[in-house]
Amino acid sequence: MRRLNNLFPFTKQGAHSARPVSPIPWRDALWVLPFFFFIFLLVFLPSASLLSGSFQDKRGNFTLQNYLDLFKPSILSAYWISIRISLASALGGGLLGFMMAYGITVGGLPRRLRTALLTFSGVASNFAGVPLAFAFMATLGRTGLITVLIQTLFGINLYERGFSIYSFWGLTFTYIYFQFPLMILIITPALDGLRREWREAAQILGASSWEYWRRVALPVLTPSILGAMILLFGNAFGAYATALSLTGGVINLVTTLIGAQIKGDVLQNLGLGYALAMGMVVVMAIMISIYYLLRRYSERWLKI
Amino acid sequence: MAFLVLSHVSKAFGQTQAVKDFNLEVEKGEFISFLGPSGCGKTTTLRMIAGFEQPTEGQILLEGEDITFRPPHQRNVGMVFQSYALFPNMTVAQNIAFGLEVRKMDRAKIKERVHEVLSLIQLEDYGGRYPYQLSGGQQQRVALARALAIRPRLLLLDEPLSALDAKIRLELRQEIRRIQQALGITTIYVTHDQEEALSLSDRIVVMNQGQIEQIGTPFEIYNYPQSEFVASFVGQLNLLPVEVLDLSKNICRVAGQEIRFTPTTNSILKSGKVRLAIRPEEIRLGMVEGENLLRGEIASVIFLGSIIRLRVKLGEGILISVDQFNERHFQPPRPGEVVTLHFPIHACWLL
Amino acid sequence: MKRNLRLGLLWSWFWMILGWLYFLLPLLATFLFSLRAKKDTLSFLAYERVFKDPNFWKTFAFSLEIGLITILAGLVLIVPTAYWIRLRLPRLRMITEFVSMLPFVVPAIVLVFGLIRVFSGAPFYLTNTYMGTNALLVAAYIVLALPYLYRAIDTGLAAIDVRALTEAAQSLGAGWPVILLRIILPNLRVAMISAAFLTLATVMGEFTIASFLVGIKAFGPYMSLVGQNKTYESSSLAIISFVLTWAFMGFIQLFSRGRAEAAPPGAH
């Protein structure tokens, strides 16, 4: 299991062998200082700054008002819909991506398809923002390709039935476009790590394909799948460009709210922006904690 | 009819012919080894018996039933893999119980059976451990127990000891034989290690390039190899260029020295290139009247522990290996010394 | 067995086709739409207009430049670090792996918000100068590309036995510069190339950070601006940006395949 070269360590199944604990030699540590200094400057300092800013009012005095403002219904609903879209697109994209990755790893599809799919996943997982929004408007918009197609083929008008590209489902479908390729990239190495012998051993012991998946393959994959879901969730939760071009002011997501605070239009309230940002970090932290708890349980058979 | 019959079994992967016209009958309770170098088709044949591969031609019968195209999970056959293939997410006991659970056996009986096989492999206290907490040898014993727990009709072992240390390998080898005999289970064992095949098997099937070279008891395979391949693959063998002087009197010449050999029945002699075959352990230092004698110069002395291997130069480019048992008082000759070697007439034959 | 196998294959194909449809249909729709710039007839007018717009080329060149600098700076920062951690400080790997995943925890919008707050004021005043702003943009992109950069490099290092190579070089008398430049870097070529293109693909269309730091000087915000004003051009831009990203990926495949074929058989 530990030979997996995973692109994303959150999904890594094996932990590293424990070495005897001794202090890190400072001369060796000197070499990696620039990197950590960079991270400190570019990630921790800004985060800390946002944290301190979130506790200040416009004049710089301490206040909790920014956090209290988060509990306004409009803002709570922004968080709620962000979380829902992230969950839905992570689950949908995760399922589609998993099934496709299954096809090219153990599903017996031709080898060439694998290369093509992995390349495409690299492209599509980076395809976001305005171009993506436009692609989906042209597809599922009021006069989009699919909308028209469904209208002519089945006589069903999606928009009369309450669908809109600017709605929860519209956004979710759009997000899935960059979610499932990411899932493919993450989960393929894990599926490659399933050993043929496990399947064969299960078979010869009398297990059907389904029993093998339920009792062996899925439990083995669970840590990887959990990790992948976290990344997918984060990926959708932090999406700004796509949301901005698609929501068109109809739906407020957390990211577009933050954007509005920075941009300095009428709504500007920097303190609230900081608090909103901290809220996002907190949501992610909660998700990651849940992930670690689940992984602890699902990985109890792994050497730590 | 025999317990397991493979008749005219062939397997092709695209253009490559992995197994060609394989015929074998195995009796109930027999221990059969498939022996050969890697890529000789032994594993493919085993996998066809297990059901992981399907023959392109031929038939496989188990207890009279045609199982050629039956899926593996309906064959009731046990298999042990080189890489153990224990399910990493299950404890030892859960691994062993797996095959019984998918058979919907009742819980109490499963518990009993798990306990029974655990004691068979002498790992009674390890039921609650996960595979990563076991050594390689222990893992393979659990894999064996897992395969046996379902009371298979047939036990298949695919190079089960190859991934283990030399010492563990020896131990486990004896254990496999002990368990096999205790249960009387029909077993097929794939290996490239001649020592394993010789020590374990009732019969050995030597394979090369997808074909059977010879089927026989270990004794027959070692002492009466029917082809050059078998002779040189199983055990060490000297093959010396000879000039046949008189076929009717069984006399030939090796490096200018006359040698008498065992009468040869097969037709190899007519095939042109003829060589004298003799095992290194049949040759001794010194002179003995009535036996074959060869004189040569010691080229090198290799110390192998229990034996000492001498390389003796008989003529230009003709070297012969001689194995001597090591003894405390034995003074091995030095390179450059001229020595006389002797060996019985029945020890050498033409190939 | 045969039936089961066929059923499984059918299952695999079903999802594969569904996925490819999901992938291709929006592109097709966009493409068809982009051809309708002229009334009642299909034409490449929208593409012509895009290519004639000097701002298209200006912003494209700007983002490309920023992307290349990001790659260079990112590699200089990360390669020695990843190498040293693999060689001497394996215990830090857990930490660096976590750090390399930070962009998933701290979204771009939060990151840029914080960056502006920290670096626009004392003592940095980075956003007051052209160079300073661009430097900040590059630094932010390094953070953004960290998951790709770090993972690709680290995976590349895992594929070669760093310790054995280093010790072999040392025993032959090589010093650190020689080891890094002549042993480690050549062996990391493929990993670095793939990291580079993934980074470029990320940077080229990036909107969030660019729009707050440099505005429509960058390609992403430019696309957005066009999208707000000109419908057909924006869909042709979407196609162009997709083709571009695809081209980068093609390069990666090309480079990594050239390497794979040169590798001795049985190496994997």
Image (tube, helix red, strand yellow):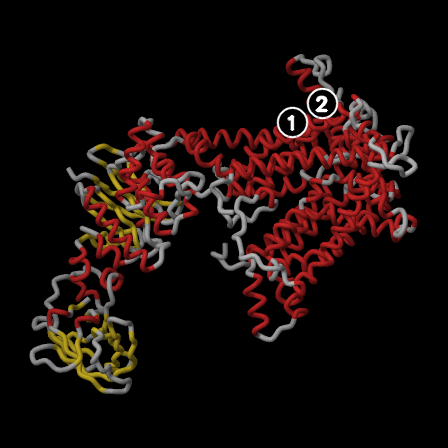
Instruction: Using the image, name the chain to which the residue with label 1 belongs.
Output: A
Q: Quadrant of residue A58?
A: top right
Residue B337, percent from left and from top: 24, 87
Residue pointed to by mark 2? A168
| Marker disc for residue A88 | 1
Q: Secondary structure at mark 1?
A: helix
Q: Secondary structure at mark 2?
A: helix
Residue type at numbered disc 2: Phe
Residue A274, percent from left and from top: 82, 36
Quarter of the image containing the N terminus of chain C?
A: top left
Q: Residues within 10 Å of mark 2 (few under 14, many from 20)?
A: some
The answer as to whether the residues below labels 1 and 2 share one chain is: yes
Position of residue B77 in the picture relative to residue A76 (left or right): left
Figure check: A170 above or below B183: above
Instruction: Using the image, name the chain to which the residue with label 2 belongs.
Output: A
Residue type at numbered disc 1: Ala
Residue B176, percent from left and from top: 25, 49
Asked whether disc 1 touches disc 2, contact meaning CB atoms under 8 Å apart, the reply is yes
Q: Is residue B17 visible?
A: no
The residue most toward the bottom is B337
